[in-house]
Image: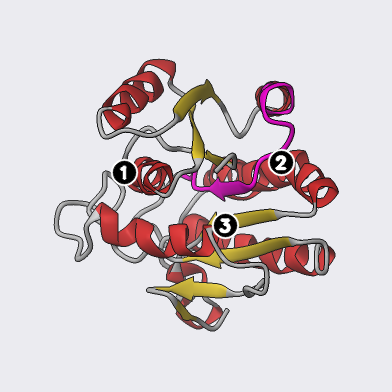
């Protein structure tokens, strides 16, 4: 298999596990992270299990960084087959919407929404030209409209916006061979989810990898958790 999968925010947790699982399926994996040392350490660790895994530094909030990644991919592979938009932050846990600073919203949206849009704008056209692509946006059930209650407002609203972006991208790319979907990994034992979360990183990565490997007649413009479609 000569298919490249790009995974953002992949130096640890769910992103790293997605890299592991995709490599085990035979994909060439490009693990990206903002921190070079952590990213290279993650690649070295993953390579012990086998697989064709590479590292490239990426700050999804930096337009120049995204452009450098795109140039690297074009030079070495032409176009990616898979883009997993995993990089995100949560900095307003336990905050309430009437109290949190608008600056927190801006800081959260920078990677969680605009960063993912920037990656899609960089790579979806290459996928469209190739006639094949799978884009998976890692979202959260906290972004579902029925769950919005004023808690953790910046993170929750960023995921609501990401869900909307997923729909827009899917409809814009319909019929091109590029499938775009959102996935909620659930409550996972990561630095973000905490040690008491109910799922392992392997369980959290499962549906992301499943959506990244849909057949040509697979769904697009949908939201999944545990391989089941969810309401927006």
- Write the start and end of the magenta stretch as one range: 72-88
Left or right of residue 95: residue 174: right
Rendered view: 121 above or below 168: above
Left or right of residue 137: residue 71: right
As measured in the structure, the alpha-carbon distance from the residue carrying label 3 to the one carrying label 1 is 16 Å
Q: Give the labeled residue for mark 3.
A: 136
Q: Residues within 10 Å of mark 3 (few under 14, many from 20)?
A: many
- Callout 1: SS: helix
- Callout 2: SS: helix
Q: Quadrant of residue 66?
A: top right
Q: Earlier in the sequence, mark 2 or mark 3?
A: 2
- Residue extending furthest toward the left: 196
Q: Position of residue 4 (x, y in %)?
A: 58, 39
Q: Foreground residue, 110 or 232?
A: 232
Q: Are marks 2 and 1 in contact (CB under 8 Å)?
A: no
Q: Earlier in the sequence, mark 2 or mark 1?
A: 1
Numbered circle sitting on residue 199: none
* Residue 94 showing in the rendered view: no
Q: Give the labeled residue for mark 2.
A: 118
- Callout 3: SS: strand
Q: Give the labeled residue for mark 1.
A: 13
Left or right of residue 172: residue 231: left
Q: Is residue 184 magenta?
A: no
Q: Position of residue 39 (x, y in %)?
A: 40, 24
User: At 67% across and 23% down in the image, what residue appears?
Assistant: 76
Q: Foreground residue, 171 or 142?
A: 171
Left or right of residue 80: residue 21: left
In this view, the mark in front (2 or 3): 3
């Amino acid at each position: 298999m000569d298919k490249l999968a790009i995974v953002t925010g992949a130096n640890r947790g769910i992103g790293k596990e997605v890299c592991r699982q995709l490599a085990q399926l035979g994909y060439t994996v490009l693990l990206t992270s903002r921190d070079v040392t952590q990213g290279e350490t993650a690649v070295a660790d993953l390579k012990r299990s086998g697989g064709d895994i590479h590292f490239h530094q990426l700050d999804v909030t930096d337009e120049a960084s995204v452009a450098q990644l795109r140039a690297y991919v074009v030079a070495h592979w032409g176009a990616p087959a898979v883009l997993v938009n995993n990089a995100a932050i949560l900095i307003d846990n336990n905050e309430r919407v009437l109290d949190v600073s608008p600056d927190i919203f801006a800081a959260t949206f920078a990677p969680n929404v605009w960063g993912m849009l920037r990656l899609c704008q960089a790579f979806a056209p290459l996928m469209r030209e190739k006639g094949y692509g799978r884009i998976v946006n890692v979202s959260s059930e906290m972004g579902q409209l029925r769950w919005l209650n004023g808690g953790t407002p910046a993170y929750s609203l960023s995921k609501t916006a990401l869900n909307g972006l997923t729909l827009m991208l899917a409809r814009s790319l319909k019929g091109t061979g590029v499938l775009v979907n959102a996935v909620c990994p659930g409550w996972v034992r990561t630095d973000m989810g905490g040690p008491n979360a109910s799922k392992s990183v392997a369980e959290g990565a499962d549906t992301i990898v499943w959506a990244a490997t849909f057949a040509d007649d697979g769904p697009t413009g949908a939201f999944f958790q545990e391989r089941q479609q969810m309401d927006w």
